[in-house]
Image (cartoon, rainbow, N blue to C red):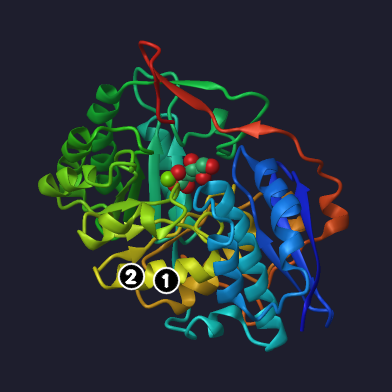
Amino acid sequence: MKISAASVNITSPGRNFVTLKIQTDEGIDGLGDATLNGRELSVASYLNDHVIPCIIGRDPFQTEDIWQYLYRGAYWRRGPVTMAAVAAVDVALWDIKGKALNTPVYNLLGGKSRESVLVYCHATGSDTDHALEDVARHRELGYKAIRVQSGIPGLSSTYGIAKSGGKYEPAERGLPSEFAWAAEPYLRHVPGLFARVRENFGEELCLLHDCHHRLTPIDAARLGKELEPFHLFWLEDPTTAELQEGFKLIRQHTTTPIAVGEVFNSIWDAHDLIRNQWIDFIRMSVVHAGGLTHLKKIADFAALYHVRTGCHGATDLSPVTMAAALHFGMAIHNFGIQEHMPHNGETEAVFPHSYEFVDGNMVPGDGPGLGVDLDEALAAKYPYQRAYLPVNRRLDGTLTDW
Ligand code: CS2
Ligand code: MG
């Protein structure tokens, strides 16, 4: 079997998605997600202008050699654009391999280690009361694990809160909007939020929270310590992770489990975090961390250090990534949890898929390959619209981490 053609599809059913389709001379094709929120066209060009010419004629079963060719052969390696492009090729090849062998991709990753995978959803609210209402709504839907974010008294905006009760979507069409941030009001507010959640919903519910890279290590240590009575499943992105050693300081002060990695794109971004056990969950995703070939190696390395997976799964990762993440989650031993932000109806129609939500868990489906498709005719109805993630400034105007 040989790769005969490849094409990049860009569609925007409510938000932008970039999808690579690889075709073979035996009529089997595969899909890979190449979406990088706010920088979509960079990955599309990396694929069209630099990668696709090099993969035509290759054997699609050679996932390892093609991964190494695209990683080492580029000379300039790592980084979100490069690794999203490598991921798109890699996932499309695993899709082809599963279809050619008439088996679901999880069987190529070790087979079922579980019957379904635990997922978590997002509950948000402009204030604590609204956030509690949203927790109740999601618990009614059957979720066993819920991330809780709320507006912060004294701040006009903050991360993770849907505008006027709509669906939360991180990217915004047009130029980046500017958010205002101050750590102290946030640090004063969050422990009370989780006290109220535990008071209302008891101890059973798995609770998660995302700091979204905004705290210093010592502030993150303070928050982790003050959240200990509420036994979070994890505290996510407590501080920026370029300085991996910053997490050592957090670890010295709190037993609240730590999750990090959605902005990482290779094992080298997390090597020290994992081998020093400074974290408990690694959040790297199939689309941003070089695909299933690389993510499986990361999970296996993490398993040596009691670190579990908690892959990113926001709406800016397409249903192709969701499908691949679920196959991955079914097979790997040190699976922790999978993020599940349901896509909107238009996206679901553009990407028909076999995965489904069942009583707080998800299953990928047992058909060959990934079990997801791309309706190119429908996709064409949603032309690309440039969009950006917001930027964030402290109250004195200093630009900080969104
Ligand atoms: C968030 C994301 O899902 C998460 O944990 O951090 O919403 C993130 O902000 C977006 O995926 C960025 O595109
Ligand atoms: Mg996050």
Mark seen at residue 348:
none
Q: Residue at left 54%, top 68%?
A: 68
Q: Residue at left 56%, top 22%?
A: 177
Where in the figure is residue 150, as x and y percent of width and height? 39, 34
Ligand 2 lies in quarter:
top left
Q: Residue at left 32%, top 21%?
A: 182
Pointer 2 and pointer 1: residues touching (CB < 8 Å)?
yes
Tell me where residue 13 sits by quadrant.
top right
Where in the figure is residue 394, as x and y percent of width and height? 37, 18
- Quadrant the N terminus occupies: bottom right
Nearest the camera: 167 or 197? 167
Nearest the camera: 102 or 64? 64
Which element is circle 1 on?
Answer: helix
Q: Label 1 is placed on what type of residue? A: Lys
Mark seen at residue 301:
2
Q: Residues within 10 Å of mark 1 (few under 14, many from 20)?
A: few
**Measured Cα–Cα span from mark 2 to mark 1:** 6 Å
Asked if residue 395 lies left or right of residue 345, the reply is: left
Where in the figure is residue 355, as x and y percent of width and height? 62, 70
Q: What residue does disc 1 label?
A: 297
Which element is circle 2 on?
Answer: helix
